[in-house]
């Protein structure tokens, strides 16, 4: 081989080595450098963003707490669930407070329509720390109750107002009203149907309302009412409303956290504090109501704990007006259970107004003698 050929071959090999070095070493190194430059630029942008957020940390934390407090306040407008026991007691409360008779109503299954704080999903939730994502979410549910009713037109208006002002969010999506146009007082008795929409939000730290059920199972005589009281009475015509204006005893039930008055006040005269028997405990207190004869006269006494008051009964019956209120929140558990011991032939009538429909403050416990509640 000639010397010139050897030199040419060496030149070609050198060029090949240079090309390979560039292709497989230098080019990859430059690509890595370019990628690092891009990553550096991205990281620098993220650092600037984080620094800007850090400078606003105090404001963000304050606004977060404010929004969380506003959210929790809004949640108070909705119960934690729509269980059937609560629904039944609410319907019973409507009858007592509005003097409307529910002829029938349906209780469908809850309908889930939204999960707060995320896109809607009802299945295949991601597992987070051993619990499904659904368990950590607030879930909005609703029910539509179809109710057929009967009552006066005036009481129907009270019912609509009752729904509008109820402590939890409700609305009426449809209503029909029929009246007896051939009667002298066609507005005295109306009937129809209502679609009542109720809403609830379940989720973390949400506690369902405790339902207080005061329903006696059966009576000794089918021709007598609860406690042996004859079904017909002078107070039936207006559902015991006359007791509000004229009564032997008044029981006032309010939030025990109210600083202006005691949570429970029983009195024969609400303007005379000497007749007061009170309790400020935020709990369900037991009140003993005793009607008895002494020295040829009838007496009534009421007691809570060690405090009591006695008065002669000068009427032909004993009437008790219970003025209650809706509960403020889940911590408001104030209420009273009245044990009635009626040793006389007098009838005892209770009229309850304004009580919480889902978790009533008032309940009758043990009872003897003739007793009826409106």
Image (cartoon, helix red, strand yellow):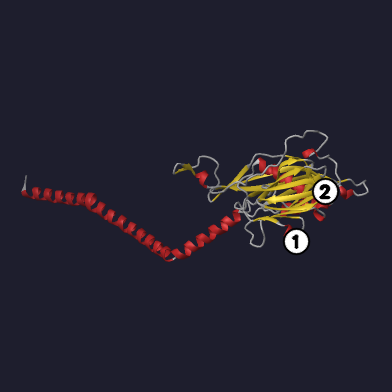
* Side of 51 relative to 9 (left or right): right
The residue where tag 1 is placed is 272
Is 22 drawn above or below residue 44 in the view shown? above
Q: Which mark is residue 297?
A: 2
Between 204 and 92, the one nearer to me in the picture: 92
**SS type, badge 2:** strand
Whole-percent x, y for residue 62 in the image:
49, 63
Residue at image x 69%, y 40%?
107
Residue 241 in view (yes/no): no
Callout 1: few (<14), some (14-19), or many (20+) C-alpha neighbours within 10 Å?
Answer: few
Callout 2: few (<14), some (14-19), or many (20+) C-alpha neighbours within 10 Å?
Answer: few
* Side of 282 relative to 301 (left or right): left
Whole-percent x, y for residue 60 in the image:
47, 62
Which is more N-terminal, label 2 or label 1?
1
Tell me the CA gap for discs 1 and 2: 23 Å
Residue at image x 6%, y 44%?
1
* Side of 48 relative to 326 (left or right): left
**SS type, badge 1:** loop
Whole-percent x, y for residue 334 in the image:
64, 52
């Amino acid at each position: 081989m000639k010397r010139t050929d050897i030199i040419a071959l060496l030149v070609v090999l050198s060029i090949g080595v240079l090309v390979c070095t560039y292709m497989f070493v230098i080019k990859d190194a430059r690509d890595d450098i370019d990628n690092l430059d891009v990553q550096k630029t991205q990281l620098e942008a993220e650092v600037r963003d984080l620094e800007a957020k850090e400078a606003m940390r105090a404001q963000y934390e304050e606004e977060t707490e404010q929004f969380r407090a506003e959210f929790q306040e809004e949640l108070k407008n909705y119960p934690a669930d729509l269980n059937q026991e609560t629904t039944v007691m609410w319907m019973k409360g409507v009858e007592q407070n509005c003097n409307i008779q529910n002829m029938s109503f349906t209780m469908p299954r809850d309908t889930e329509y939204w999960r707060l704080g995320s896109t809607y999903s009802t299945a295949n939730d991601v597992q987070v720390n051993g619990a499904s994502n659904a368990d950590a979410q607030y879930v909005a549910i609703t029910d539509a109750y179809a109710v057929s009713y009967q009552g006066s037109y005036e009481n129907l208006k009270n019912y609509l107002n009752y729904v509008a002002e109820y402590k939890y969010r409700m609305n009426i999506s449809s209503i029909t009203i029929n009246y007896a146009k051939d009667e002298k007082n066609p507005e005295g008795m109306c009937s129809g149907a209502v679609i009542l929409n109720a809403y609830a939000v379940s989720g973390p730290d949400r506690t369902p309302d405790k339902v207080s059920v005061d329903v006696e199972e059966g009576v000794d005589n089918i021709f007598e009412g609860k406690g042996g009281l004859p079904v017909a009475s002078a107070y039936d015509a207006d559902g015991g409303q006359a007791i509000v204006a004229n009564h032997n005893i008044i029981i006032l039930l309010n939030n025990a956290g109210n600083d202006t008055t005691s949570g429970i006040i029983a009195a024969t005269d609400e303007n005379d504090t000497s007749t007061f028997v009170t309790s400020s405990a935020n709990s369900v207190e037991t009140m003993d109501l005793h009607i008895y004869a002494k020295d040829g006269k009838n007496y009534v006494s009421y007691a809570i704990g060690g405090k009591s008051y006695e008065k002669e009964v000068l009427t032909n019956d004993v009437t008790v007006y219970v003025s209650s209120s809706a509960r403020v929140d889940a911590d408001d558990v104030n209420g009273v259970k009245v044990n009635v011991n009626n040793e006389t032939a007098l009838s005892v009538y209770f009229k309850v107004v304004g009580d919480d429909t889902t978790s009533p403050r008032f309940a009758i416990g043990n009872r003897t003698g003739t007793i009826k509640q409106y």
